[in-house]
Each structure stands twice: as structure tokens, then as C-alpha cells.
Amino acid sequence: MGKSRTTKFKRPQFNAVGLPVNALKEADPEEEAHGEESCPAAELLEKLQSPSADVREFACASISRVVQQSQTIPGFLQRDAVRRLGPMLLDSSLAVRETATGALRNLSACGGQEVCEDMVKHDVMTPLTALLRECCAGFESAVVQMKEQKNPVEDVANEAVHLLWNLCESSNQALSMFNRAGLLDVVVQCLERHPHNLELAISAAHCLHTVTEDNSELLCSMNTAMLSALENVLLSSQPSMAHTLLRTLAAGTLWNMKGSLPAARQAQALSAVVATLSKCLDLDAGTLIPELRQAEEDRNRNAPAATDAEDQAAGELAVNEMNEMDEEEEAPQQKRNGKSVKIDNDFSDLLPRGKEELREATALLTAQQTSLEIIVNMCCSDDPSDDEWEEESSSDESDMCPDSLCDGVSNLMSPLCLSAEVHGALINHSVPEKVLKKTEFPRTEATDVCHQNPSWRGLIKKMQRVQSRALTCFHSILSTMDAESLGGAAALQGAAQHLSTLVFGAAEIPKDEEFLEAVISAMRSLLQMIAFKNIPQCMTPQQLMSLSEAANRCDVVSVRVNAVAILGITGSTLAKEKGTAETLQMIGNALLQVATRDADLVVNGEALDALFDVFADGDEAETAAKNIQLLPALKALHPVFKAKIRKEGRGKYSPQQLCVLDNIKVNLRRFIGYLEKLGKK
């Protein structure tokens, strides 16, 4: 039903179980009574009022730990935890400030979108804003006794920026308050601490990457100080994985703010962004993860036995709890700016201290996933639309950006004027080849060392997610580049063979929905390009049928749609060749089955559209159509399809989908007429 397009990636949010606030009102009275006994919320919240700073700190730290178990969160919310924790952000004790902010951060990370929105509604942004401003004012003035000692004010700021990031990711109201409060400069100050406090800088970079995405109001606040801060990060050369993540996030932020860059700096910025992403993708997680795991073993072996053993055991327990949360079922897609946003089950922000190598491995995989998502967004021009960009580009810059950045700006950078430059930059840095390399299955050496240690087991899912993102990224690249840019016929056939191996290389087709959705989208785009260039296909009829059967069992509509489209692309190519009638019959029967039996109208329509393409012309197609009784089958289906659109269409499908379905309904009637004429010859 038309060319497959890629949706822009939104920034992943650090939460897993979306916990509806209104679910609290529907709790069973007996369960509430039981909860009074088992939930420590009442006692811990009461201790927040203690005159002793040590008791208040203990209470906040305990809440921070307890809310990581999502089933305890309702007990805290029922007791007005957000409003009671809010004043603790400005407590006279720095330790209380840090633990209170950490408790709210964990509540936002583990509670889900509705909990974040509830926190904003309970005015958590007011004390948080005041805290952040006080922290930044105290960066230089805080006394640090020893050179190696961390600045306690920066520890508080790290928790605060992390909380701000989570809230702005989940709540449009928090984002609007961020804009109005002028918090951009505060977060940039935290980013500038990267030579002294990398953890704080990464939190700030995550926050900036989130708040600068699709935030036209904030673009007017961009200034040279922010550009300089981002450039300093991009020019850093430290080889650690944490620094790689920091540079990747800075590159993503720079891409997000492309619309407010001075014209003279646009080409330089684009080059820096693509070079940073390319270097990140050069890193081989399959080699680095076993090396990091070995380094952890060596460090533990050489560490003092007594206290470090206790610390290690506590760290292992905390990581194992996080891995269990990470493996829970994903929450439904949240909405932001009216769009669905798929949430990553990622609790890496809650990793305990003392797991440096695991943090490095997590930072590597997060950086590579983020790099791939940024490249997808660079290739995607449907949000904002080309028309919107044209309108912004032709508007009066002085009205849009009153600050000093507008001085000397002759035009805003838009995807339309950048497309050739983006294309060139990606090709010059061999990005398509590097993305295709990342679509390979995680190396056995890396998965084996992760399987062997419970703390590292959660990385396996992160490696698989990088692979799925790479497949989606490759799909975007295929959708926006021509065959010659990608290496010509030989390279495309090699890529097709590689994707076929991913799907058909094992004894059975993988069942993971995220992987299936990504790989089938990539296969569809690649086969479309191959068919357009009349390059020989590489999939056998048996493989096609296996793919179709696997897709039909999948609950994800886009997987079934793309599998049907692949049948149509392959069938229409085969219809031009001699001796293919038998294979066309197989494809036709499969498409008829989907058109009549699939529960989703969009999938039905895609199957019909594919049938029109396969049997549109040619002697082989005519023979196959007669053998499978295509004409009577479509005549019987026509009134059923019309009735289904009339009955289910209005409430279940978007206006755009209904428009496409109406066109297919018209084309079905015409195609039946075409087949009838063929039968009279």
C-alpha cells in the first residue's frame, strides 16, 4: 500500500512498568488493608519530618531503594509522597537533598509516564528548579578537601538533572515549564563539568538530547555558550565508553538544534555529528564486552577480600533486581506530542557504584543504540514535514529568535536543503556499511560471558536491541539513498543475502517481535530497490512461505503488512519470468488467505494490493490466476471487504488508512473487471 516509511525515534525513557495513577483509586479494599501492613511507605514518609538530618537521609535513601520495586509505588503515591518529598530537595543537609532527589528520580524512572505527570501536577518542578539553580551556583564555591574527592554539590546536581530528564521525557507540561523557567543554561553548566564529573555531564547530555527534540520554543534560547559547550564535548578525545556516550549525546543534541545554527556553521556541525556517530559505530561490542568482563574479574581478584566482597555482593543483588525489572513485560506505548513513543525497558541509570566495567559496557551499547536512532532521524523527513520546514525557513528569523544567535543568520537549516549534504556525509564516513555490520547477531563470545554472570545478563537484551535498531536504520538508509550510493547491484545482493541469513539461518525463524519488525522492514525496502533495478532476487519460494507463515503468527500489524508486501514484490518480479506459474500460485494462495482471514483491515488491504501487483500482467500470472480460481475468490471477497470497511472502519482506523482502504476497494472492483475480460478472450 505504498512505499514503506520509517518513523522517527523519540528519546528512550528510563522506565519499564507504566503504572497508571488512576489504578490507585480502583484498588481492592482488602488489598489496601494488606498493603498497610506490608508497605513501609507510611513509616518512611513519617520519618521525613524528623528533626534529625540522619533520620531524614535514611528515610529518603530507603524510599529510593523501595520504589525500585514498582508494586510498592501505589502505597507511596496514596500517601502524597511527592508533595512530602518535594521540600526535602531544599533541605539544609546536602546529604538529604541528594537522597530525596534520588528517591524522586527512582520514582519517576520506575513509575512510568502517568506517575511522572502526577509528579509534575504536584508541583515537583518548583523545588527542583530552585535546587538546580543553587547547585550550579555552588559548583565552584563548594569546598573539596582532597583532589580525588567528589564535589558533594555535583552529586546532588546529578540526581536533580536525572530527575529533570525523566520528567521532561514523559510530560509535555514539564517540558513547557523547562522552557519557561530558562533551565537550558543550568543544564549546559552541568554539561560543562565533563572534565571534572563525567557522570553529571552524561546526565546533562541525556537531558539536553531529550529537551531539544522537536522543541521549537527552546530553539530561540540557543546561544553561543551552548554551542561552545557541545563543541568542547565533541572535540574531547578520551577513549572510554562513557566518553563515547557523552559525545554521541552531544552529537544528537547538535542535530536536534540544527534549525537554529548560524549558516556559516552548518556544514561544520553536520560533519562533526556524522564523524562522531561513525566512530561510535566503529567500536566492536563483541570484542569489548568480553574484555570488560575480564577486567572486572581481574579487579575483583586483586581487591581486598573482606569489605570488597560485601560491596560486590550488594552490587550483584542490586544489578540482579534491575535485570528482573528490565525483563518485565513492556508497558503500552506512551504518547508525546500526540505520537506513540515506544518505551525501552532500561534501568541502566540505576546501576550501583562499583560496577565500573558493567557501566562501561552499558554506556557502549547505549551509545551505539543512540547513534543508530540519530541516523534514522537524519534520514527521516516526515517530522516535521517538509512543508513545515519550508515555512520556517522562509519566515523572518528576527521574529523567531530574538537572541544574539540570530545575528548574521541568513537562513535556517532544513532537511530539504541539507539532504544532499547529509547523504554525502553518511557516504563519506561509510555509515551504510557500518550500519549493515551492526545488523549481525551479537557475537557468541559476548553473549556467553554475559550468560555466565547474572549481573551482565541484562546486556544480552541491549545487544539485541542494538541489532534491531541497526536493521531499522538500514531500512531508513535504503529508503533515502539510491542503489549506486549503496555500492550497486553486487552490494545490494550481498545485503539481501545477509538479511536472508539473519531470518533463515537458524533452524526456525526468530520469534522476537522487535527483531522481526525491524528485519522484515529492512527486507521490504531492499527487495523494492532490487526489483526496481531488475537485480535477481535471492529468496527461494520455500523461504518466502516460511516468512509469510512466521509473520502471520505475529501480533504486530507492521510485521504482517511488510511480509505481505514482500510476497507482492517478489511475485510481481517473478511474473515477468518464464516457468514461474507454480511459484505464483503458491504466492497467490498465501495472499488470498491473508486477504480473507487476517483480522486487521490494513493487512487485508495490503494483501489485495499485492495480489493486484502479482497478477496484473503476463502469461505466467494469467495461468496461475486461473489455477487458483482467483476471479471467483475475489468476487466472493469483494462484498465482505466492503462490509468490513463500513462496519469497522470509522472507529478503528485513521482517516489516512480509510482513504487508502477506499482506494483498494475501488481497485478491487476494477481488478475483478480486468480478470473477467481476460476470461472472455
Image: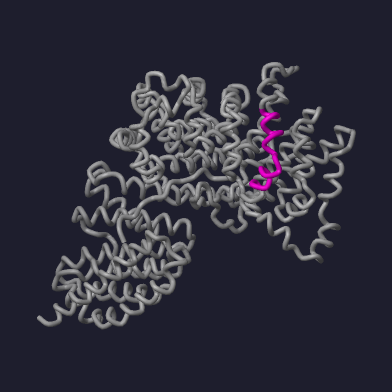
Q: Is residue 143 above or below residue 32?
A: above
In reply to whether residue 484 is colored magenta, the answer given is: no
Which is more toward the observer, 667 or 242? 667
Which residue is painted at 47% across and 39% down in the image?
Answer: 214
Which is more toward the observer, 504 or 106? 106
Quadrant in which residue 671 is drawn? bottom left
- The type of colouring in the image is one colour
In reply to whether residue 131 is colored magenta, the answer given is: yes
Image quarter of the N terminus: bottom left
- Residue 87 in the image: state x and y as whole percent: 77, 35
Q: Residue furthest right?
A: 51
- Residue 614 in the image: state x and y as whole percent: 23, 68
Q: Is residue 127 visible?
A: yes
Q: Is residue 571 above or below residue 498?
A: below
Which residue is painted at 27% across and 62% down in the image?
Answer: 569
Image quarter of the C terminus: bottom left
Left or right of 674 on screen, residue 275: right
Which residue is painted at 25% across and 41% down in the image?
Answer: 485
Which is more toward the observer, 629 or 431? 629
- Residue 673 in the image: state x and y as whole percent: 19, 76
Which residue is painted at 24% across and 54% down in the image?
Answer: 530
- Residue 434 in the image: state x and y as whole percent: 37, 41
Q: Is residue 603 above or below residue 182?
A: below
Left or right of 65 on screen, residue 514: left
What residue span does the magenta drawing correspond to?
116-132
Quadrant in which residue 625 is drawn? bottom left
Q: Main secondary structure of the magenta part?
A: helix
Which is more toward the observer, 656 or 546? 656
Left or right of 559 on screen, residue 456: right
